[in-house]
Every structure is written in C-alpha cells, then in structure tokens.
Image (tube, helix red, strand yellow):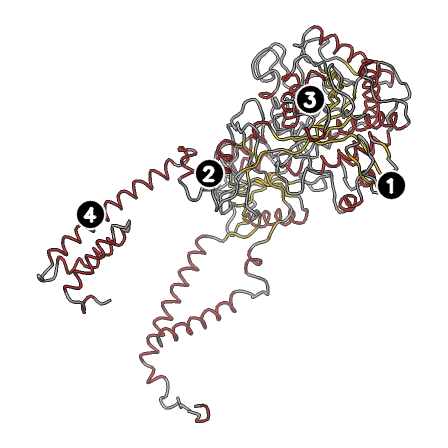
Amino acid sequence: MAYFQIFLRVNIIFILLFSVLKIKVYGDKIEQSIYSQISGYSSCVTLLNATHQIGCTSKRKGNVGVVHYIDSDENFKWLLNKGKYSPYVSLFTAEYFTDDRLKQLINADKLSGALVLYARNFTINGTNPPNSGFSPEYPCPNEKFGLYGSNGVYSCSGNGSNSVTWNDNGSEMSYRDYGIPVFALYKENEINNLIKCYKDHNKPVNGENPDYPLCGVEMMSFMHAAKDTPTCMRKSSAPKYTQNGFCDPLGDKNVWGTLFSFADDSFTHNDVILATAKLDSTAFFHDLAPGADNDATGVTVLLAAAEVLGNLTRNDSIKAPDLKKNQKHIMFSFFHGEVWDYIGSSRMVYDMMNGDFPDKGLKLPRLDLSNIAYYLELNQVGLLDENSLWAHRDPESEEHVRSKTKTMFNTLSKFGASVNLAIKDPSQSKVQPLPPASFQRFLKGNRSIPGLVIADHKAAYTNKFYNSRFDDVQRLDVKHLTKLATTVAKTLYELAYNETNDDMAANEERVTELLGCLIVNQNCSLFKQVVTKDKAYRLASQNGPLPRYVGTDNKLNGPSGITVMTQYLLAYFTGINLNVTGCPAGSGNMSFVYHNAYGTCIGASVYSSPAKSPAFILEDYGSTEYSTWTESRWGNDNRIRMFLIADPTQEAITLAVGIMLTLISLVVTVFMYRKAEQLFTPGDRVLVINDDMQ
Amino acid sequence: MDLRKVSDQDKLQLCRRYFVIGFAFLPFLWFVNFVWFFKYAFYVKHFEGQKKMRYYLTGSLIGFLVWFIGLTVWISVYQKNRASWGATGDMISFLIPLGEP
C-alpha cells in the first residue's frame, strides 16, 4: 500500500510539473480546445428503393480525413496523384464538385469524406454554379415508372427513333452510392476558418506534401439502413424491443380542391377537368432544394389561375356546373413526392381505381379515372424555349382521344395568343412522347384521358439546374407566368362551361408575390394573411423558401410546410368569405373552413389526400409498378468538426516519454521506500492522541 | 476456497458437482473444473477416488471442447451468412446490426 501511495504522489507531481510547463491551461473543456465544431452544414443522406441504396453515409464512429481544398483542376490532380496522407476529406468549390471527380478520388482510395461550399446567394467565393449547368438527377427522370418504359420508340434512355433525353445535363449524382459522408457547408466564418486551416497546414509546398501537423476534419453521419427497401422494411418490422426502425417510406399529402363542391353531384360521364402541378423537388442535399423552376412555377401559375376562377365564383359570374348540360367540374390537384417515381400521382390513381377517391369519410361522390374529361398539367413553366411554352401530349393515344386533345390544345393556344403568349406543339416536326409528368401515371391507369403537359422545353429541359440546389439561379419571367395563368384559367373555363369569358385576367402582382413567397422567403405578407393566426406567428420566425424535399411519411408535425401552405392558398383563392358568426358551423358543403389571420372566415372545397406509395399499402417493397423509395434513419449525433492531426512520430515519442517517466518514478519510489530510514529523520513523526475525542 | 485445505473426498465431491452442473449448458464451468482439478487428478500422488476424478475431468474437457468447437463454428457461420439468410437471419438475431445489409 505504502509503495503505491508514494508512487502515485510522485507521478502526480511529475504530471503537474509537465502540464504547467508545456500546455497553457484554458478554462474550456479539453474537447473544445482540441476540436472546432462546424455548425453550418447540410448532409447527404441514404435513400433506398426496391433494388438499390443511394446517397451517403459515414462509418459508425465517423470518418476522419486530411482537408484538401479543390478549387482548380491542378489541386484535384495533385490530390489524385501526389497526396500521401490518405484518407483525405476534399473541400470542393461548387464548380469542381462533380460526379466524375468524386468517383476518381473514391476509386483511388483517397477520400473518407467530401465537403462542398454553398451560399444561397453566392455571397461566398467558390459557391457559384458551374456555367454549363448542374443537375444531379437522372438524364431520364422516373423513366421506369412512367408510361413508356426504358425500351421502345418513345423511351428516354433507349435508342428509340422518337426518344428524347429529357434531362440531358443529368449526372445521376443524387443516385450514386458514394459510401462516404458528403456535406455542404454554408456558414461563411466557418468556411473561412477551414480554408485558413488548410492554407496554414495542408497546402502543398512547391507541389510537395506538407509536414505535420495537418488540418483534419471528422465527419459523422451514420445511416442505419443498408442495401434496399425490402431489407430495411423487413428489419423495421421485425419484432425487436431493443431497436427502432431502420427506414421510413417517403411520402406526404397531396392537396386537391374544387371550384364548386362535388357534394351534390354524382359522376357518370367525363364530368371533371383536372388541372395539376407538383409540389416537390429535390437536390443532392435534400435541405437545399429551392425547387424554383421545377415546382414553384407550376404551383404559382395553377394557384393564380385558381384565383382568377375563384374571383368569378365570388362575384357570382359562374354557378356550380350543371352536369346534365354537359358542364364540368374544375378540380385542382397538387401532387407530392413526384420526384421519387411519382408517389403522389400514383397514389391518387391507385385510390381512384380502387374506388377510394375521394376518401369515403368526406361523403363525396366517387371519382373514377374515366370521369376525367380533360387533364392539364403545369410542369416547369418559368423559362421559355424558342420564346414559347410547349404543350406536350401522348403520341400513342387513340384517335377519339387525340381529337379531344387537339381541342384542348387549340383552346389553350388561342387564349395564349390573345395575351401574346406562344404555346406550341412540340410534336409538329417530329412526334415525341410526354416528358416525365404526373399525367403519365393517369394514362397508365386509363389511356383514354385527353390531356396536355405544359412545359418550358420543346425537347430536352431548358432548365440546366433541374433538381439541384441551383434551381433558383435562372431568371424566371413573371410576365409570362401571369399570361400563362390567364390562359390556363380561360382554357379551364371554356372547357368546363363551353363558353368564353373575356373578363378573366391573372394579376401580375399576385403572381410576383406568390413566386417570391415560394422561392425567396416564406415569411411574406401573402402567406401570413392566408393562414390562421397561430400559423402566421410561426411563419414569422422562418426564413428562406419552404423545404421542397418530400421527406418521410411519418413526420412528427403533420404534412410538410409546402403542403399545408398550398392547402391554405388554394382555399383562400377558390373559397368564399363566409361571414358567419361561429365560423365553422353552417358552412354547408365547405370542407375547409377557417379564420385567416385577419379574422375573416373562409370556406372552400379543399382537401388533402395521402401521398404515400401504394407499394407500402400492398407491402410489395420490391414493386416495379409503384415507388419504393425509403429514407434511412440516422442517429442524432451527426456532426462535423475540425482539428489538427499531429505527426505520428511525435505521438510515438510522447508515448515513449510517458512510459519512461513512469518507470523512472517507479525506480525512485522503490529507492525512497527502501531508504526511508536514512532519508527521513525518524522521530519526526509524533502521534498525538487527544483523550477528549475518545 | 483453498483446495490445499480440502480433503481429497471433498475435492472429488466438488469435482463431481461441477461436472454435473456443467450439463446445464455451462461449458465454461466444465473448463474451470478441468483447470482447477487438473493438478490433483493427473499430477499428485494417488489417492482414493482419483480415478473417478480423472473420469469427471476428461468428461468436462470433452464437453467443453464440443461446446467450444460447436459455438465457434456456429458463430462464424452466423456472422458470415446472417445477411444472406434474410428474414430468418433477422429473426434469430437479438440485435440487428445498423448500417449493413
């Protein structure tokens, strides 16, 4: 015992001595003085489908690498050929963040992680989008779940005589399984610190490898699911009391509404005109999907057109359609999760075919695919191609359908021309298929629905940033969106009521406002005035556009922001002011009744319907018919931090010195114990016994 | 317990008890039994019942080895094939590993 105590004491003295001499002692925790946390990051996550896993993941304990900044081809080549401190974490400028470079570095076993610079308005150097465009999407989005498949004359990826490679800029980056963590960094001071750390320690000196210490980064983003959806769903449903799920299906809610309530009708014919747009987009980093041209333009135009028609109902210019007089209902629908193999539309079609649409609880007449008189879809419509918009149609439809489609097209282009907006037929010179669109799913269910898909591209996409974080860099033209809204409203009206109404015009200010709210900032006056008071309060604390990635079906706070907002907007535009005391009561057929932030009571026939793929109802996780996309779960310890990596030889020396000190102190202790009699004068120790204390 | 202070008969008794309890799926107990009494069964001079002790110890060793080999084989087969067994693999796992098939 005595041995040990003295030994400990001597050791502690040594340790204290050295720590005072060598290390400046700070008040902070040791962790804080070693690591510098990076808080402004957005990570790429793992998604799975019937056969694959895509995206990124770190190892369970995180990935560590030496930072290497790639802002030129020279830097990239140096890392590939000369860098000797593998693994690295490469820090890319936006321009050099490409699939090709990532793959080369990963194949050469150089990378344990990757970072890319990001700033929404390009305020940071190295965040500008590549001039040639950037789309991490497939060249043929959703092809296998569309109408034309991957073979045949109209297939996108095949060599068919009439094929069109829609997204010819697509690099498929979002669909790769990189197996390393990839983050986007967006806080300027943190980015500057990291680049400074790189320049101070890691930058090659005259083309040679630098010396230790090196600037390192640790990235943690460990994904729980692996392989594919059948595997992770099976594991999630295995009865385990110690483990939670592994993955969750993607999904949300579709929003739909009608100008007049369906409640008093029943459908026997082609009684409903369906006008649709999609609510979602994506990007390599899901949180950074602005979805401007991709979905916001379509949503804006459809909502603006709905308002024009809503105005007519509010001033009593139009009445509920008389189905017996061959008039038709106008229905608006916004699909969610369309990026991921048409989740929203395929579900609505599935429900319609099973007699489950509208939801039975709503007590509305059953709507079947055969009741759809016309289908008009607004796809990407913010840009122009050859100064026009293009109305795509299905080339394989039957003759009687084709003639109705022709009627639709003529009406559309007529009204377009009246407001000086060219809407053309892309199949004029060469017959081509429909671009990727929700309409394909409706045609899959029933090929005889006449319909058009309006888009801003004649063949390949005009949008060079499709489903990327740069989708909002292109100048969207509010003027032509307004014209399109007018055209759509007039077309819908004429198709529904078989008469023309020239009093219809969309409001340019409203279109500007809507587009701004959707792609610039959700914290805007229109949104705040449309929603209820408590939701308006919540908006006030938000910034930037509403997130556009569909997310998982089991969100804690209900449907995504864009779904809820679209529902309110559609209600506000198509509904009427009820002015009833005790608002929800006495609202008749209105399903969506609420007080907006100004206290007005608004009632409308607006609903939401599930946007969860039928594959998860059928529990057919290997489905080739329905979307099987799921998102992996992950732990809550995701992080990225920066630190200095010391020279391994220095570390070895430190360890050796430590061991030597221990041995020396042991020898000293033994010596002191043995010679205690000589070293310390005996008799110094006086034992005092206090009698009082006994 | 200090075996040096225990009589030969008690040792034999103890050895036998360990041997029997080992049948309750306790191979490690067999191993301990073997190590503990090895010296007395095979090295020290003869005492009454040593033969019986040898018998228990040999049994313990064999039992332990069977278990050891069996478990080793099973664990390596399981670790190698769990993923490919699919649902069965999940069912017989107490903890399903994260981040792998």
Disc 4 marks a residue whose amino acid type is: Ile
SS label for mark 1: loop
Q: Earlier in the sequence, mark 2 or mark 4?
A: 4
Q: Are marks 2 and 4 in contact (CB under 8 Å)?
A: no
Q: Which of the two discs, 4 and 1, sits closer to the camera?
A: 1
Q: Which mark is residue A581?
A: 1
| Left or right, B6 with reference to A433 | left
Q: Nearer the viewer, mark 3 or mark 2?
A: 2
Work out how far the residue at label 3 is from the one at label 2, CA to CA, in angstroms.
Answer: 38 Å
Which sits in the foreground, A367 or A167?
Answer: A367
In the image, residue B43 sits, relative to residue A415, either above or below, namely below
Label 1 packing within 10 angstroms: few (<14), some (14-19), many (20+): few
Give the side of residue A611 with respect to residue B58, left or right. right
**Could you say whether the residue bearing mark 3 is in a helix, strand or loop?**
loop
CA–CA distance between discs 3 and 4? Answer: 74 Å
The label on residue B62 is 4
Tell me, for residue B100, which label it has, or none.
2
Q: Nearer the viewer, mark 2 or mark 4?
A: 4
Residue A42 locus on image (x, y percent): 63, 42
Q: Residue furthest bottom?
A: A691
Of A288 and A95, which appears nearest the observer? A288
